Image (tube, coloured by chain):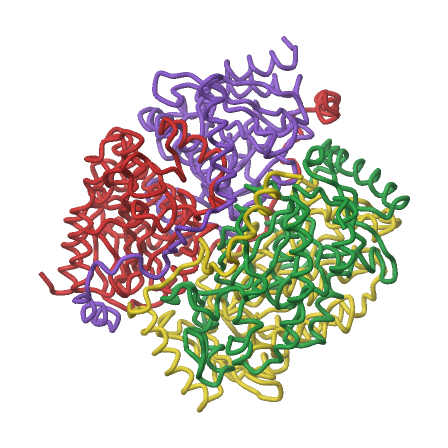
Chain colours: A green, B yellow, C purple, D red
Amino acid sequence: MSSISNQVKSLRELKRNQKNLSPSPIPNKDFTSASREEILNRVEQDYKDFKNTRTFKFPSWLYGPPKGKLFKVEVEDCPNFGDKAFVEFDSARTAFLSIDMQVDFCGPKGYVDVMGYDLGLTSAPIKPIMHILYTIRNETDIKVIHTREGHLPDLSDAPYNKILRSKIIGNGVGIGNIPDGGLGRLLVRGEKNWDIIDDLYPIPGEYIVDKAGKGAFGQSNLPLILRNLGITHLVITGITTDVCVHTIMREANDNGYWCTLIKDGTGATDYGNYQAAIKQIKMQGGVFGWVSDSSKFTKAIKSAFNGG
Amino acid sequence: MSSISNQVKSLRELKRNQKNLSPSPIPNKDFTSASREEILNRVEQDYKDFKNTRTFKFPSWLYGPPKGKLFKVEVEDCPNFGDKAFVEFDSARTAFLSIDMQVDFCGPKGYVDVMGYDLGLTSAPIKPIMHILYTIRNETDIKVIHTREGHLPDLSDAPYNKILRSKIIGNGVGIGNIPDGGLGRLLVRGEKNWDIIDDLYPIPGEYIVDKAGKGAFGQSNLPLILRNLGITHLVITGITTDVCVHTIMREANDNGYWCTLIKDGTGATDYGNYQAAIKQIKMQGGVFGWVSDSSKFTKAIKSAFNGG
Amino acid sequence: MSSISNQVKSLRELKRNQKNLSPSPIPNKDFTSASREEILNRVEQDYKDFKNTRTFKFPSWLYGPPKGKLFKVEVEDCPNFGDKAFVEFDSARTAFLSIDMQVDFCGPKGYVDVMGYDLGLTSAPIKPIMHILYTIRNETDIKVIHTREGHLPDLSDAPYNKILRSKIIGNGVGIGNIPDGGLGRLLVRGEKNWDIIDDLYPIPGEYIVDKAGKGAFGQSNLPLILRNLGITHLVITGITTDVCVHTIMREANDNGYWCTLIKDGTGATDYGNYQAAIKQIKMQGGVFGWVSDSSKFTKAIKSAFNGG
Amino acid sequence: MSSISNQVKSLRELKRNQKNLSPSPIPNKDFTSASREEILNRVEQDYKDFKNTRTFKFPSWLYGPPKGKLFKVEVEDCPNFGDKAFVEFDSARTAFLSIDMQVDFCGPKGYVDVMGYDLGLTSAPIKPIMHILYTIRNETDIKVIHTREGHLPDLSDAPYNKILRSKIIGNGVGIGNIPDGGLGRLLVRGEKNWDIIDDLYPIPGEYIVDKAGKGAFGQSNLPLILRNLGITHLVITGITTDVCVHTIMREANDNGYWCTLIKDGTGATDYGNYQAAIKQIKMQGGVFGWVSDSSKFTKAIKSAFNGG
C-alpha cells in the first residue's frame, strides 16, 4: 500500500473536528466590506423593483446605458413554477446562439443518425430557429453566432475516450470514420456532414465558432468573441439540449452572462432528457438562467423594433 | 437601425450556399494523416478488445503502466441501456471527488433549506459517500478531493445575476444574507453554513478546492491539482446532481478525464431531475462518462486491495 | 523505435509542399465579410483620429458611454520610440492592479530575500504605488485590486518542478519551508511573509485575488472579478516586472483589456531585466499595451477629478 | 463622485492593520498536512539527488516509468549564472514546439516586415530549428507541434485594440489589411503570409495549433493536445522570443510543464530584448524553466537514440 495511504491512516486519529482546514478563508467578522455592502444594497433595490415589475431589468448601472433597443421577453416558471416574469435585453449587447445545427447532429447519415437516434427530435428546432433568424436578420442589430462541434482532421483535439466510446456505440463506426454511404468522416472539420445545415447556414456578418468539446469556454474563441462584441445577454438555441446546449449555457452562466434558452429552438436525442434539461434550468429561481420560446422572443423583438 | 443590420440586409441576396465560410478548415483530402491513422488503429484494436471483454481498460499505452493497483468497476446501461460493462482504474491515478457536501446544500438553515427544497433529497448521498470514504481511507492510495462552492466575503467573484436570482427565490434572503436563525451569510466563504458537513469532513492528506461557480475548471485550482497529482480517472459524488456535479463532470469530460458518477452518492433538489441527470450521462454510449453505484465501486476496491 | 516515428519516416517522402494542412482554414476569397469590413472601417476612422489627436480614445462605440470621468494619461515611446501619445480612460471602468506586493517578494526574510536578491530593487515601487493609492482612494471611483501569489498549505496547487527549483536555488529552503529566523513557510497562504506589506495593505472596498501561478487567468478569480466590475482598462503596478507583472499583462492583453504599466510602480530582481521588460511592451507599437509613470498617471487623475 | 468612493473614504479611518482580510486563508497551524509533508519529503530527496547529479531527473514517481527513451540535455546558468545542469526527458512524453514560424513573422512582405523590423533577427532561428526537426524526424518518437498566430477572416477573435495598434504602427496597414505588393491580409488565417514558411513546414504526423493570441492556453486546442498526447516536457523554439514564445512558456510553466527554451532556435525583433528574454528565464533558479541550445539538444537525442 502506498505511503500516502499509510500516512492518512496514521493521521486519522487526529481530532476530526479541526475545522476550516487550510484552503478556507476565515474573514474578519468585524470588518465591514464596503464592496459587499454596495452590492447587497443594489440587490435589495433590484429585488424590490422585481417584486413590482416582475422584470429582470437591463442593468445599466453595470454595463452602461443601452446602445441598441431595449426589449422585454417573457420567461416561464420564474421565479417559481407557474410564475411568469420578464428579462430585459439591450439588442446591441445581445447575441443569439445557434449551437451545433450540423448535419452530424440533425441530418441523415450524420453522427446522431449513425448512432440510431430519432432525427425527428434533433431536427425539430430547425423551423423555430429559422423563424428567429428571419426576424433578427431583417430588423435588428442582435449579433448571431453559430457553433460547430468537430475535430481537427488529425483528431489531435479529441480525447481518446471520446473517440473510443463513439466507436463502440456506433458499432465500429465512430469519430473519424466514414459510415456506409456517409458524407465524410464523422465529426471531422471540413467534412460535409460536419457543416451547418443549409436551412440555417450563416450569412455575411454572422460569426462561426469551431469547438472540440461539448462546451465552448476554455478551448474555443467564443469567450473572446463575446467580449470583443461587448455582449452581456445570450439567447440560446441548438442541439442537443442536454449536451452541448446545456454545457455552453452552464459555462456562460458561471461567467456572468444572462442566458435565456428558447425551448422550442432546441432538441435532444431523448424527449424525456429534453424536458428535464428545460426543468433543470428553472430550479432555484433560474440556476442557469431563464426559459422562453421562439414566439415570445420574436414578439418582443418585433414590438421593440416596430416591425411586423 | 444599426449599420450592421443594414449591411446584413444588403448582403443577404448573396448566394446562400457559399458554404464552408471563413472559420472552417478544408483539409486536403489526399493528405493521409499519420496522426489520425495511428489513433484510428488504436481505437479499432480497443474496440475489438471491448467487444470481447466489455471493459474500458486502463490505457497504459497513453498514461504509462499502472502505478497503483488496477481495479474494474461495473458500470450500468453501457454502451446501450440494459447492457453492463466495466471501467478499469489505476488506483494511483484515480481521484475521488466529493462535490459541495456543504451545510448550505444539505443541512438545516443552509442555502437549499432557505429556498424551501427537501433536504432529504440532497442529504441522501451522505451515507454512501461515508461508506466509500471509509473504504478508500483504510485501504487505498486513491486521492480524495472535496470541493466547496462559495464566494469571497466581498462577493466580488459572484456574478450579479446569480446574487439577484438568489435574493428573489429566497424571498429577500439570498447570497450574502443571513437567514433568520441562520448560521452565517449564505454561500460566503468562512461561514459555518458554507463549510463541509461533519460526517464528510476532510482528513489530513485530502484536498479541498474552493470555487465560485457551479463548475470548477477555468476559475479554480482543480485542474492544476489533478495535473499535479497525475490523475487520469475521476469517481464523482456530491450535490446537486444536475447542477454542480453535472457541470464539473462535463468540464472534466471535455478535458479528457475518464469520469464515473456514483449514482447513490449524489442527489438533487428534485427527484425527476436527479433521474434525468443520470440518464443524460448514459446517452450516446456515455456522452459524459459512466454511471455506477457505491456498492459496485467499494466491492471493486476491496477485491483489488484484498481488504474487506 | 516507436510506431509513430516509423510512420513519420515512411511518410516523409510525401511531397513536402502539400500546404495548408488540416487545421488551416481556407476562406472563400470571394466572400465579403460584413463583419470584417465593419471593423476595418472603424479602425480606419480611429487611425485617422489618432493621427490628429495622438490619443487612444475610450471606445464608447464598443463599451457604451462613460460611466465615470474620462481622463487622458500620457504614455511614452508610442507608437514609435521617442514619440508620446495618450490613452483615455473611463474611471468607472478602470481597475488599478497592485500585483504581489507581499513580504515574500519585497520584505526581509521573504522568498526573494532568501534567494539572495537585492530587496532595494523590488521595494522601489512601494512609494510610487502608495502615492497612486492615496490619489485614487481620495478622489476617484477607480477600482483597486491587489493580488497575492501563494500556495495552499497542502501545496496541492504548486507544480512539483516549481517547488523543486525553489528548493535548489534557496540552498535547501524553498516553497513550503521556513527559513532561519523566517516569518513562516515561504509562499504559503496564511503566513505573515505571504501577506501584503503594511504600507500597501488593502482598505475596505478594495479587492484581493489569490493566485497560485505567475499569471492570474485560468486559475484565479481575477477574470470573473474584472467582468463583474465592468472593467475595460487596467493600470498595472507591482512586482516583479518581468515575472508576475508581465505575465498578467500578457494574459489581460490577449483577453482584450487595455493595459498600461506604471514603470516606476514596478520592480524586478535584476535591473537589466526590469529595463528590458519595459522595452518589450513598447515593441510593435505596444505589443502588450502602454507604459506610463506614477507622476503622469496621478496628474491625469487630479486634472479630471479637480482634486489637487 | 461615485458612491463607492464615498464609502471608501468613510471607511478609511478603520484600523489599517486589520490584516488577513477576507480572501486570505488562515490555516490551522496545528494541523499537520499529510499532503504537504509527503511533497516536502520528496523534494528533500530530489534536492539531495540534484546536488550529486546536477540533474533534474524525469520524475517517474509522478508520471510513471519512461515510455520512450530517456535523454539528458545540458542547460546553462542553472541554478545560478555560470553553473551548468541537466534536464532529463522521456522522449515519448516530450513535445517539440515550433512557435509561429510564419511568413508574417520572418518572411518578406509579412507583418513584421511591414512594421519595419529587421528580418535577419526573426529568421535567424530557421536553420537551428531545421537541424532539430531533421534529428527528431529521423530518429525519435518526440512529438512535433507547430503553432500559427492568426485571426479568423471576420476578425471576430482579434481584440479591437490589437487591430488598432497594428494599424497605427503599420502606418495605415495593419491586421486584416493587404500591404502594397503583399501576399494577403496580414495575420489572417488562410492567407499565404499567415502560413508556416516552406523550410519548416509540418510533415504528416505532426500537429498544428491555430491561436488568436500571443499565448495558446485558454483559447486554443494546445492544452487539450498536450494532454491527449501525454506530454510532460516541452522543448520550445520559434518567434518572437519576448512575445509569443515567452507567453506560451509562461503559461505552460504555470500549468506545470517542464519547459526548456532552445536559445538559438528563437529570435526577436530587437536583439537586446532577445537577450533579456533569455536571461529572465534563468532568474530564481529557472523561474520559467531552462535554457539550452540546438547543438546540446540534438547531441543528447543522438546519444540516446544511438543515431548520428
Give the percent coordinates (x, y) of residue A29: 74, 38
Of residue A218 and residue A135, the one placed in the foreground of this image is A135
Write the residue at 23% across / 31% down: D118
**How many numbered discs sit on the rendered protein?**
0
Residue extending farthest to the top is C308
Q: Is residue A170 left or right of residue D268?
A: right
Give the percent coordinates (x, y) of residue D2: 72, 23
Question: Where C159 falls versus A193 (above or below)?
Answer: above
Give the percent coordinates (x, y) of residue C149: 50, 39
Of residue D105 and residue B264, the one placed in the foreground of this image is D105
Residue extending farthest to the right is A52
Q: Is residue B143 left or right of residue A136?
A: left
Question: Where D184 falls versus A160 (above or below)?
Answer: above
Location of residue A46 by image quarter: top right
Give the percent coordinates (x, y) of residue B154: 70, 38
Q: Is residue B208 left or right of residue B180?
A: left
Write the residue at 12% across / 65% down: D306
Residue extending farthest to the front is B13
Q: Is residue D246 left or right of residue A282?
A: left
Of residue A150 and residue C273, the one placed in the foreground of this image is A150
Q: Where, quadrant-wise, is the C terminus of chain D in this rendering?
A: bottom left
Write the residue at 59% across / 16% down: C301
Question: Where B297 falls versus D21 (above or below)?
Answer: below
Of residue D40 and residue A170, the one placed in the foreground of this image is A170
Q: Where, quadrant-wise, is the N terminus of chain D in this rendering?
A: top right
Q: Is residue C113 visible?
A: no
Residue extending farthest to the bottom is B52
Q: Is residue A224 visible?
A: yes
